[in-house]
Structures are given as C-alpha cells and as structure tokens.
Image (tube, grey):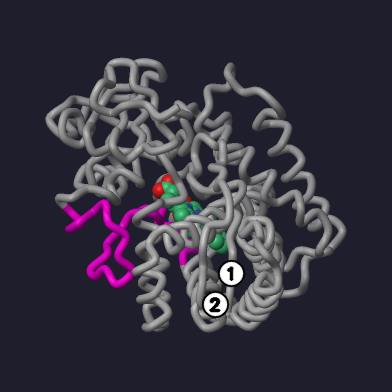
Amino acid sequence: MLADASSVDWSTFDPFDPSVRVDPYPHYARLREVAPCLRLERYGVWLVTSYGAVDRVLRDWRTFSSGQGAALEPAASPEEGGVILSTDPPEHTRIRRAVSKDFTPKMVSNLEPGVRSLAERTIDAALGEAQVDWVNALARPLPTVTMAKLMGYPEKHQEQYCLWASTIFNAMGCPAKEMDGPGFSEVAGQLYSFVTELATNHEYVANGWGDRLVQAGDRGELTASEVQSLLGGILVAAMDTTVNMLGNLAYSLTTHPDQWQLLRDSPDLADSAVNESLRFESPVQPGFFRVATEDVQVEGVTIPKGARVMVAFGSANRDRRQFKDADTFLIGRTPNDHLAFGRGTHFCLGAPVARLIGRVVLEELSARVGTLALAGEAVLKNNRMLRGFDVLPLRLAA
Ligand code: HEM
C-alpha cells in the first residue's frame, strides 16, 4: 500500500519501507521542505534529501568519509565493503588510478558493436511477439553479456551476476539482524570465490579489464585482496544498476508517449534521454552512505561526529530548486546536472559504459519500433537500495 506523505510522522519515517519505495517522491518533496537533513530514529542515521546538501556531502570527502563503507552498517573491512567504494584519498586515489589506467575509452567504444547487435536481435525478436518482458528479454541480458565481455570473463555463471549484485545491494541497505534469505557474507563469498578461481585458473581473456587488474596485482600496484575486491566489486556495481536503468528508461518512455514520439522524431536525443531517465528514476535509491568525521551543520542541523549519513540521489534529482519542472520527464532537458552517478571522488567509474548501453538501446528502439506500450502489470523490484523493475511487460510494434 502507498503511504501518504502528508500524514507521515517524520520521527518514524523509514525510506526503506516498501510502502514508501512504491512512490518515494512525494515523501522526498515534503522532506526537502520540512526536514532536508533528518535523523532516522529507526536506523540512527541521517538522511539528506536536498540537491545542495547531497552535492556538498559527496564533494567533501574529508568531512564525509567513505572509509567505513558506503552501506547502512559499517563494512567489516574495506575489502568487504568494496575496496574502491570504502576508501578515502590518498588510498582511494592510488586504487582508482590503478583501476582507471586499465579501463580505457577504447575498451568502452569496443563494446558498441556487440551491444548494438544484441539490442537489434532482441528488439527484432520482440517485434514478432504479442508481448515481451523487457527485463528478461533485454534489460538483464544486455549488461550481463556486455560486462562479461568488458571484464574478459568466460561465459559460465553469467546468470548468477544479477543475483549476486542485487543481493549485495539489498544487504547494503539492511540491518544485518533483519536480513532474511542468503546473507551478505554468503553471497559475497560465492562472488569472490568465482573471481578468484578465474584468476587462479588463468581464465580471464588476455588484456580484458579483469586480466589487467590481475596483472596490476602481479606488478605490486594493488594487493591480492584489493584485486579480488575490485574484480567482484566492479561486477556488483555494474550489473543491477544498469539493468534497472534500462527498465526505468523503457517504462518512462511508455508512460510518456509524447516523449517517445519526440525520440522517434529526433533520435539524436538518445543520449539526453538516457540522462533524463537517470535523473527522473535514479537506479540507486535511496542512496549511499558516508560517516561524518566531525560535528557538521547540514541544512541547519548538526550531524554529530561519527554519525552515518545517507545521500538520497533520487530526491536530489527531483529538487525543484535545481531542476525546472523537476517531476516532469523531458528527454531534451538541458542542463541536466543530475547526481545518479554520484559526484566527486567516488563518481561512477562505469558511467561511460552505462551511457553507451542506454544510448545504443534507444537508437535501435527508435529506429525499429513505432508503438511502445505497457502490456501488463509492471512489477517493481523489491530491493532496499535499487529502484527498477523485476517484470516489465511491453508490446513493441513496427
Ligand atoms: C546506470 C548504471 C549505474 C549507476 C546508476 C551507477 C551509480 C553509481 C554511483 C551513485 C556511484 C557512487 C558511489 C558513492 O558515491 O559512494 C557509483 C560508483 C561506482 N560505479 Fe557505478 N553506476 C552504474 C553503472 C556502473 C557500471 C556499468 C560500472 C562498471 C563498468 C560501475 C562501476 C562503479 C565503480 C567501480 C564505482 C566506485 C567508484 C569509486 O568509488 O571511486 N558502475 N556508481
């Protein structure tokens, strides 16, 4: 059931509650007015919802540290929290430099023909069907296959990638004592065994990103546990985020037929449409965490030293002080300085890959499809840190 934002008792507000997650935006709109920096009693953390404050927290790593992990509860170690996400400069600078050196624009552009041909084939197949589940047919396989190619992973276990990623994301927003089903440690253990086994068996494709990270370890630029954490962590960071972006993108276009028509008339808006979808329905929600390293004022409220702070990307991206008509989906929006990929030190390393996948899918979709319509009930994903669909039945017609 949908919670009513006008009657919420903010002292007990829970952004992870399923009734809020169905449609979080009225809650965030109200919060930005009445309490843009709110202590969540249930979790003992601070929720920051205005664009200005989220932007500030993300830029100021000295005051808002990632060193104790980006999740609701502290990571047992940087490796467990994802070594790149859970460190501050100068350690983070060293790791990010080693990782970025091996992740070139050429590696990203080389992915385009494969993404295009899979998108083409999937869309053509969908045109012959009465309806398709967009998530199952395209949104999930496309990033899975693309990431395996980028990392240079063999084909085995690809069906596990999304499961590993979504379980780990969900655990990031869940108190350990409330977790049901396989816990974080169990799933992270499977993922890390997988990536380590590939390295031990020399199964990474030569000169793919995975192989290059292993080589960086061999040269002593990264420690063995950093290499392992990166190989697994990048997969997690890349997978369900991009799946949800593709689902949200298709959903927003079906529910805004004027914007779909605009895209068909002006396919060169594909890039901009991806950007707008990331703003309008940000895949990472409510958001990642930092820890205050000193007492600090945010939106007139003092956050005490040591407190965990959650930055609500999806709320910041709907802040009308930053975006005109913030609650309207406009694929030609410019400027569009959204925060869906974060900002500052930890800005998403894989943003060019996600953008490429989104753009190519929209180019192929707008070239081949005339009618794009919902064909059944869309089912939202039940995940505490991600916003997107588990099922999205669509009808595609030429
Ligand atoms: C639409 C898809 C994606 C979204 C919405 C997204 C979102 C984000 C966000 C919000 C952060 C910042 C975390 C923080 O500030 O604590 C981040 C970091 C990161 N992302 Fe993405 N991401 C996406 C796709 C990808 C892909 C495809 C890859 C890999 C190819 C990737 C790899 C990473 C890595 C490695 C980091 C950590 C960077 C660092 O800590 O320096 N992401 N992502």
On the image, which quarter does residue 210 sit in?
bottom right
Q: Which residue is mark 1?
A: 396
Left or right: 73, with 279 as reference point: right
Q: Residues within 10 Å of mark 2 (few under 14, many from 20)?
A: some
Q: Nearer the viewer, residue 354 or 214?
A: 354
What amino acid type should be assigned to the residue bearing mark 1?
Leu
Q: Is residue 200 visible?
A: yes
**Residue at position x 54%, y 31% in the image:** 75
Q: Which residues are magenta?
A: 322-351
Q: Which residue is mark 2?
A: 369
What amino acid type should be assigned to the residue bearing mark 2?
Val
Q: Is residue 147 visible?
A: no
Residue 176 screen position, x and y as percent:
58, 22
Q: What element does badge 2 sit on?
A: loop
Residue 156 screen position, x and y as percent:
83, 58
Query: Disc 2, disc 1: CB below 8 Å?
Result: yes
Residue 342 screen position, x and y as percent:
37, 53
**Residue at position x 57%, y 79% in the image:** 398
Q: Nearer the viewer, residue 348 or 74?
A: 348
**Residue at position x 67%, y 50% in the image:** 162
Q: Residues within 10 Å of mark 1 (few under 14, many from 20)?
A: many
